[in-house]
Image (spheres, rainbow, N blue to C red):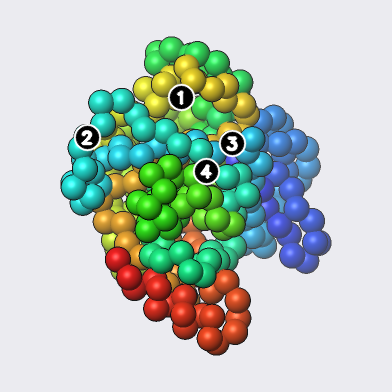
């Protein structure tokens, strides 16, 4: 399998877009994730660290797209996709820290399959929707749950800095067109907490892309978060959270408090346990 991403070479202190050949364990420098023409000699993957590889103009989230998750919130299965916008400031890369804001109550992880838009998409049909998607990646749609319930609108609860871990790289649709055959798993401190197949989405990937594009124009690099399955739960300071898509790899992020002072961290933990 071949993946698109961005990589940091610590010894050479350079960051570059790369085509990661998993079988050869090599990363070839490329012009960009949208123009993957090879521009130089490959590096051994083991010498590199993956970094954030997208810079979206918007992040579109989908609410309640798996029955199990709808049931855990005693909610109704939606008749059409629920879409919301999440601030682009929230995006972070693999191994970046998740920062728990203070005084906002419980903060939950939501393991999700992310889509990266590859071409400008405006009112595209379901049949052609996949042509506009560059690929899939792992994402975490972190949510301040109590703010979400209190506000009604979800924008604030979803948009804090570091609330959208993304990566570690992108599996191109051209490499793996079987959008309904991805396996998503979430681990908290190495314990499995979520697992689902993309085939159990209420609204599948082409439907979502077509639906969103009726309302707003999608641009290359925009991110769609396709919804989380059953098993969401709280994050606390020092937790490790991992989102894995079997066909792609694992996105790992650790959780820190907003400040390093003892008193504010302990008050944050206390609030995090309120549900
Ligand atoms: Mg979500």
Graded by Cα atoms within 10 Å as few (under 14), some (14 to 19) or many (20 or more), the crowding at tag 4 reads: many
Tell me where residue 208 appears, x and y as whole percent: 40, 26
**Residue named by callout 3:** 58
Q: Which label's residue is closer to the chain start, 1 or 3?
A: 3
Residue at 49% x, 56% y is: 251
Residue at 49% x, 20% y is: 215
Q: Which label's residue is closer to the chain start, 4 or 1?
A: 4
Task: Mark 3 and ligand 1: say if the CB distance to the nearest ligand atom is below 8 Å.
Answer: no
**Residue named by callout 1:** 212
**Tag 3 near tag 2, CB within 8 Å:** no
Q: Give whichever of 37, 98 is nearer the camera.
A: 98
Q: Which label's residue is closer to the chain start, 2 or 1?
A: 2
Q: Is mark 2 on a helix, strand or loop?
A: loop
Q: Which label's residue is closer to the chain start, 3 or 2?
A: 3
Task: Mark 4 and ligand 1: say if the CB distance to the nearest ligand atom is below 8 Å.
Answer: no
Q: Which label's residue is closer to the chain start, 2 or 4?
A: 2
Q: Alpha-carbon distance for marks 2 and 1?
A: 18 Å
**Tag 2 near tag 4, CB within 8 Å:** no
**Residue named by callout 4:** 86
């Amino acid at each position: 399998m071949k993946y698109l991403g961005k990589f940091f070479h610590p010894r050479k202190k350079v960051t570059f877009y790369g085509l990661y050949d998993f079988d050869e364990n090599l990363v070839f420098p490329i012009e960009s994730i949208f123009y993957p023409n090879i521009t130089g000699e490959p590096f051994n993957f083991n010498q590199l660290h993956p970094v954030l590889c997208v810079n979206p103009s918007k992040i579109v989230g989908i609410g309640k797209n798996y029955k199990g998750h709808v049931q855990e919130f005693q909610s109704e299965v939606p008749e059409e996709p629920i879409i919301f916008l999440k601030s682009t400031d929230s995006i972070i890369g693999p191994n970046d820290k998740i920062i728990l804001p203070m005084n906002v109550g419980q903060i939950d992880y939501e393991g999700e399959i992310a889509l990266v838009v590859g071409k400008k998409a405006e009112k595209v049909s379901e049949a052609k929707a996949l042509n506009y998607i560059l690929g899939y990646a792992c994402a975490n749609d972190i949510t301040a749950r109590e703010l979400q319930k209190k506000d009604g609108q979800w924008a604030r609860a979803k948009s804090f800095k570091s609330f959208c871990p993304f990566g570690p790289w992108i599996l191109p649709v051209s490499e793996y067109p079987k959008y309904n055959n991805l396996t998503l798993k979430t681990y908290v401190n190495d314990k499995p907490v979520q697992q689902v197949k993309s085939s159990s989405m209420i609204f599948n990937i082409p439907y979502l892309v077509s639906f969103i594009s009726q309302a707003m124009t999608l641009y290359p690099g925009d991110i769609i978060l396709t919804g989380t399955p059953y098993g969401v739960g709280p994050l606390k300071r020092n937790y490790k959270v991992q989102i894995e898509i079997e066909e792609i790899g694992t996105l790992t992020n650790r959780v820190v408090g907003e400040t390093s002072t003892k008193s504010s961290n302990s008050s944050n933990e206390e609030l995090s346990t309120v549900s």
